[in-house]
Amino acid sequence: MENLQIALNHGLSTQEYNKIVNKLGREPNLTEIGILAAMWSEHCSYKSSKIHLKRLPTKGANVIQGPGENAGIVDIGDELCVIFKMESHNHPSFIEPYQGAATGVGGILRDIFTMGARPIALLNSLRFGDPKLPKTRYLVDGVVSGIAGYGNCIGIPTVGGEVYFDECYNGNPLINVFALGITKKNEIFRGLARGVANPVIYVGSKTGRDGIHGAVMASETFTKEAEEKRPAVQVGDPFTEKLLLESCLELFKTGIVVGIQDMGAAGLTSSSTEMANRAANGIIIDIDKVPRREKEMTPYEIMLSESQERMLIVIKKGNEEIAERIFRKWNLDFSVIGEVTESSDLRIIENSDIMADLPISLITEEAPIYKRPSKKPAYLNNMKNFDIFSIPFPNNLDSIFLKILSSPTVSSKRWIFEQYDHMVRTNTVIPPGSDASIIRIKDTNKAIAITTNCNSRYCYLDPYTGSAIAVAESARNLACSGAKPLAITDCLNFGNPENPEIMWQFKKSIEGLAQAALVLNTPVVSGNVSFYNETEGVAIFPTPTVAMIGLIEDIRNHLTQWFEKEGDRIVLLGETKEEFGGSEYQKQIQGTVRGKPPQIDLRAESALIHTLLEASQTGILHSAHDLSEGGLATAISESCFTPNGSIGVKIKINDNMKIRNDAILFSESQSRALVSLERKNIPILDKITREYGVKMSNIGVVEGDRLFIENMIDIPINEGYNFWSSGFERILNSYA
């Protein structure tokens, strides 16, 4: 009974513990319980999500590596490939925002260079609570400083991202971090412990007691005692990470590496067992040989530590001196701590005594898989009772417009991204601020565009539709930048999966992601599931964050969202409907999230994407910007607020639109984009839109110094810019 209680304290259930006992034919000891509890945690085993993740499309013509490895890999031609992934660091960032965010960056970078790629870009998707709360300001400051501190020090540019604010994140901020690297197709490495008797090598920083139980903590909901878990947050060192990156890339060139994996969640436990499992081998570890920075650490602590900047490597036997010479040169710890065996077991020894002996399959493949019950949330029964006409028509559209522009979600995030070094390594073509960030591939004409999206309000109202929109908007962002959408990595953030209503949200979200990815031909090649994002029983809105990459074959064809010159015609592509459910307009006017989100027609979205790509390749477009939060009025404004100064517009909407003026301005109907071009090229665009069946409306011209939308809005463009540019900081500072 004592061991059972220990197991329960580690997050294992009675049923799971009994399964372990039956498999082993004995009671597991403390170290074995710790290993199994970490690897069977939701964070590591995906026991509640795995059965549903199988629905996601993961293969495609460009896919080299899908889910199952440290990151996904996509072919971009000319024997080159990109390696990328997104992961969450939500729970650690709530407890200790600076280190939680910083180690999230460090961990995702290791996932990239462990596969042989040099990281060239970082991206992030951040969600915070009500900006009126002092806790929100504390979290924003800490998280942004952590991301900047780690990325800037290691010299990898943070080139973009997104930031949302909503009360649902008061108790659970979301810190989702993306990284991308590039390598040659014949220089990819994987996490495999192959070759019996090959040495298992530990490199990087020494092991300490930081991060123990990190994976288990990430698999629990928060309570008022969450602050007591501060020791479970890891501590990062970007300067050591830089040394580790360069030394690993140097080692790869020797040809002696068999397999390599980052010591991430569950540390030495996950890296050793996952590498052995992929190769159908066993592994033995001599715990005495693990470098450590604290005295009297037990095997339990060493195996479960999540100290940062560490790698586990299997090399060809007889080449230990070559590897050691490289890592010693970079002033990193190096130790041969074990070897690959044919036993199919994980065996931990200390002073020649066996401290743990477990079948690899029990730790990995035999982790429980649950088909948890699900039911439609009760709150949705009342959400449909929303009528657009319940929003009274505003007396002053100018004031409503300025309120939306200065809202925390819509307003400029320059205060954040100016803390990031987005130009280091000189690959950044388009920095933060446009629809997608663009990174050149040196020595080629190619460029990679990257973006991340998710409107959690839509997902709260309809997780299927909201998730499909996250994919569609990402693809639209890329097409507006001149990039062909290629593939997805995701970060699926939800509440407690043991709650049937949360499980229903998750299932519907997977269905929406899968359908949109299938129709838009953007397979999901990597990702992360983060459950238990709730505090004291209050869950976040479902937030299935999508990060998508796209390819620009000729960098000269790239686009930005900003109007370029006076006299250009402004054209709206797509159809506007009266859709206010989950909109920024609804939130600002009524303070609620109700109704149905905008509907998404994936065929119409595909047609728009093809239209944008063909138009960009012909060279007729000067700018392109997708319509999302805040609708048409916000998109027009964002296109006016160029990096070189603001520029005015004169807009006249056709009377045949036949919808409310506030819907024309602020509806968030999908599958729409705003483009600008010379008047002489309008017929060419008209021909392309007719070919794909996309509605085209010539709505105005770039000129003057006012933001003028006939019969609706008329303000000096500089006034609009001031509201937009200072809104975010003003809101946070006013409650500091």
Image: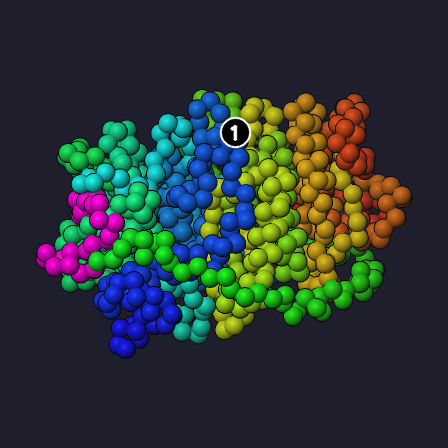
Q: Main secondary structure of the magenta part?
A: strand
Spot occupied by residue 145 in the image (x, y as percentages of width and height): 43, 53
Spot occupied by residue 447 in the image (x, y as percentages of width and height): 52, 29
Residue at 71% over, 69% down: 382
Q: Residues within 10 Å of mark 1 (few under 14, many from 20)?
A: many
Magenta stretch: includes residue 595 = no
Quarter of the image that includes the N terminus:
bottom left
Say what secondary structure mark 1 lies in.
strand
Query: In this picture, is 11 found above or below 356?
Result: below
Magenta stretch: includes residue 350 = yes
Query: In this picture, is 19 found above or below 176?
Result: below
* Residue 219 in view, yes or no: yes
Left or right: where does residue 493 sit relative to residue 382?
A: left
Residue closer to the observer: 705 or 73: 73
Residue at 70% over, 68% down: 381
Quarter of the rendering containing residue 44: bottom left
Residue closer to the observer: 606 or 547: 606
Q: What residue does disc 1 label?
A: 447
Spot occupied by residue 408 in the image (x, y as percentages of width and height): 61, 56
Residue at 66% over, 69% down: 379
**What colouring style does the render use?**
rainbow
Residue farthest along the bottom direction in this orientation: 1
Quarter of the rendering containing residue 359: bottom left
Residue closer to the observer: 279 or 227: 279
Q: How many marks?
A: 1
Spot occupied by residue 378 in the image (x, y as percentages of width and height): 65, 70
* Residue 140 in view, yes or no: no
Q: Give the residue type that dot 1 points to.
A: Ala
- The magenta stretch is 331-356
Left or right: where does residue 79 sit relative to residue 394?
A: left
Residue at 34% over, 51% down: 264
